[in-house]
Image (spheres, grey):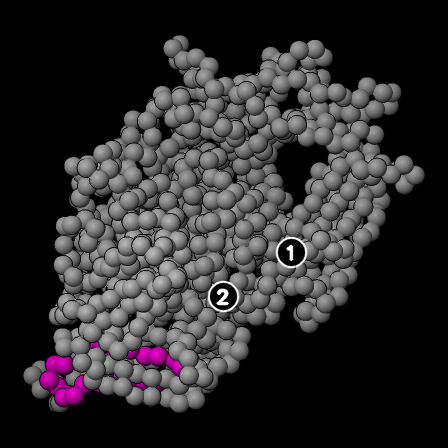
Amino acid sequence: MTSHTTIPINEDWEFKQVDSKKSKWLPVAQFPTNVHLDLIANNIIADPFMGKNELDVQWIGEAVWAYKTTFETPAISTQEGSAAKAVLAFDGLDTYATVVLNGTEILKTESMFIRERVDVTAYLKKDGPNELEITFDSAFLKGKQIVDKYPEHKWGCWNGDVSRLAVRKAQYHYGWDWGPTMLTCGPWRPINLEIYESRIADLYFRTDVEESLKAAKVIANADVEGSASLVKFDITLDGEAVASEQAKVVDGRATATFNITDPALWYPIKYGNQPLYTITATLVATRSEAYDIHVESKRFGLRRAELIQRPLKDQPGESFFFQVNNVPIFCGGSDWIPADNFVPRISPEKYYDWVKLVADGNQVMIRVWGGGIFEEQPFYDACDELGILVWQDFLFGCGNYPAFPEFLDLVKREADDNVKILRHHPSIVIWAGNNEDYQYQESENLTYDFENKDEESWLKTDFPARYIYEKILSDTCRELIPDVPYHPGSPWGKGRDTHDNTVGDIHQWNVWHGTQEKYQNFDKLGGRFVSEFGMEAFPNIKTIESFLPLGKDDPDRYPQSSTVDFHNKADGHERRIALYLVENMQYSPNPIEQYIYSTQLMQGECLASAYRLWKRQWKGPGREYCAGALVWQINDCWPVTSWAIVDYYLRPKHAYYTVKREMAPLSCGITRTLTTTPRDKHTRVYVDTKHTIEIWGSNLTLRDMVVDVVVCAFDVETGKETYNKTVKSAFSLPQNQSTEIIALDVPVKKRDAGEESRIVVAAYLIEDGVQVARYVNWSEPLKYAHFMKPQCLTATLTADARTVEISAEVPIKGLALECEDDEVKFADNLVDIVPGEVVRIGVVGARKNTVIGTRYLGMI
């Protein structure tokens, strides 16, 4: 029997514009590829990310493009009785593709997310090269035609052209409020020629870890195509054999069951290790003539993962938290969009670097947003290796999707195919049906009666996509991944209004969007699980210079220029950035570097406030009032001003560090409250005021801690210390929850003299004489503060160039370290400084002569 052989079809590709007489065949830039990358490489278009070049490349999305290559026919067994065949496997064609092999049409596609396989044995030439040609029609124009075909559907969406709803293509390609419109096409994932008589079509398994965690069961399956009758399964861990078994193929499937005692369990980062087993399925010919026909391997982790939704103590509604290996997890993390508009150029190394940034930032979860793609395997591999939990959306977002029969068939194929591709990853702990489609339904008053369970009737309403989310996708998950929770949408709360903060998850956009609340009020804006919230900030000045045609010398190198504005796609961004800046701090648009700093300080303060206040509501068993906060967003798909906390070039904004501090395993927080009490019921003049602070500790570790709590206070205008006291000794912080520590009056020397607004309060948690947590609280808004310019500010690189030591004689808000060298990376940044202490920040990539600068609030 012929062994399985895979031949990549990745060489000698050419492309051209079909509907242009002037176009000629040109070499591709890489493979896999897309048309924009190839046009850039051949100098036909300028970099679409530069300046306003996006406007000049819109014609590409309405043109017809073709790709072609040639390949030789491999040897195929012609022995009598041989069933050898040749199959072309297309991992991803974007989107409406017609595939022709040697003059014969062999395939038409309508989705960029579905793998396709075609038996081409009969179409291969015996002599000479085979010609493979793929023509890509305009997805944009196809979508427009579909919209015209179904006028009875109530088409509508947020972001992009409404025709995107009809097309199974990455929705962000149509433009979003953080990304450009780049309607790509092309062979965006690998194409292979496979030669075989039999093959392992799918290797998959179910794992079940006992509640005791002492044993695990692995049920391994290999779906087999062809006549081979025996599969050998092997499980290894770190190269060492764990278990092995042979199984017969019955009705196209071989199954083996393994019982593993004392399994090596996979945990999220900070909670344990991430051991990954490898399961290998080897298809062998016969027991008497055993040789390998086809080998498939996958890595997996053994973990017990649950979504806990149960009544809470002392508050209405239900919890919504993830529990891994019986450990409840507060899921602080980020939302993820595709890391480039041109996905084929994202390397495995860059995927790893992105996920490593998430892990290094003390984040536990990443949500793959529904307007992008099912990400590449290196992304999920990195999450498996680094212990990052994944919330995976199906690919629907911000609209009223149709449900005509052909569309539903595509959706079903797409869901089945991609769940099968991804189901072995231990990092994926939930699948959600869509992003904000139920919110769109609510905003447009589309028909939705949660109590109506007649599935077929849903298709007759003006919100037929309910059938997709609550029938098709639900069935797929129940059939293929019954041990992974399915959530019909994000946000979603068991059929209630999506803004109901007592059940399910919410998207909290009343800071920035909506009612534009003050970010200091995030404690009143929480929910059981907040899967989106955010604040915009400008990116690094180098990132801005990267899209200005003349770089540092560009006349548009200022915050309000048309080019800088063009690289911010959010509606009303000018007014909203200005609103939050003017509410909170003194700032100036010039120089641009200080303006960038101001927006990043604002973003850092805003997001830190959310994490800190919501984590405070993680109160322990039965009181998981808030169990997660995922910031919109970790990354960008091009150089832009957006909600991202790390820009397109992987340059962290300052909010990355403030979030990192708030998500540390141990942290403390302070709130400051002003209460007024009239001395009698009629007066408006004689009013008593009280300024209080509340201090709490958040212990996300899995050990109880005993700490001393020290509080210091300083006058921001003089720098003098006004208070220093150990307010709690040997105070217990139970594991995996937040605990209230103490409430105090703001410490001032003279009450009712207006000193409270000048006082900066610092709290320290001390364990065994070592400072383990620190937080500095300021009177807000910061714009009212009279900051003193420091005379003795130092930020000194130590002799080994591994640490920066910072100190000052007056309180400093938001001290940022800066370095021209991109290789220099700081472990922390945007720190508050108070007199009498030295703050040490780790640094890598520095040398003894590295110049490190500082920037802070009030310096200009």
The image shows residue 575, relative to residue 460, as above or below, that is: below
Residue 78 horizontal/vertical position (percent): 81, 19
User: Which residue corresponds to the image point at 83% horizontal and 30% vertical from the top-left?
Assistant: 1
Q: Which residue ends up furthest to the left in the rendered image?
A: 685
Q: Quadrant of residue 512?
A: bottom left
Q: Is the residue marked by circle 2 packed among few (<14), some (14-19), or many (20+) residues within 10 Å?
A: many
- Magenta-highlighted residues: 742-766
Amino acid under disc 2: Phe
Q: Which residue ends up furthest to the right in the rendered image?
A: 288
Q: Is residue 761 magenta?
A: yes
Amino acid under disc 1: Leu
The image shows residue 335, relative to residue 119, as above or below, that is: below
On-image quarter of the C terminus: bottom left
* Location of mark 1 (residue): 276
Q: Quadrant of residue 197?
A: top right
Residue 155 horizontal/vertical position (percent): 39, 38
Decide if residue 478 is on the left or right side of residue 289: left
User: Which residue corresponds to the image point at 48% horizontal and 67% vertical from the top-left?
Assistant: 330
* Location of mark 2 (residue): 320
Residue 396 horizontal/vertical position (percent): 46, 44
Q: Nearer the viewer, residue 324 or 106?
A: 324
User: Which residue corresponds to the image point at 60% horizontal and 55% vertical from the top-left?
Assistant: 426
Residue 772 horizontal/vertical position (percent): 41, 76
Q: Nearer the viewer, residue 102 or 74?
A: 74
User: Which residue corresponds to the image point at 51% horizontal and 81% vertical from the top-left?
Assistant: 704
Decide if residue 250 is on the left or right side of residue 502: right
Q: Note whether residue 443 is visible.
A: no
- Label 2 sits on a secondary structure element that is loop
Q: Is the residue marked by circle 1 packed among few (<14), some (14-19), or many (20+) residues within 10 Å?
A: many
Q: Is residue 805 magenta?
A: no
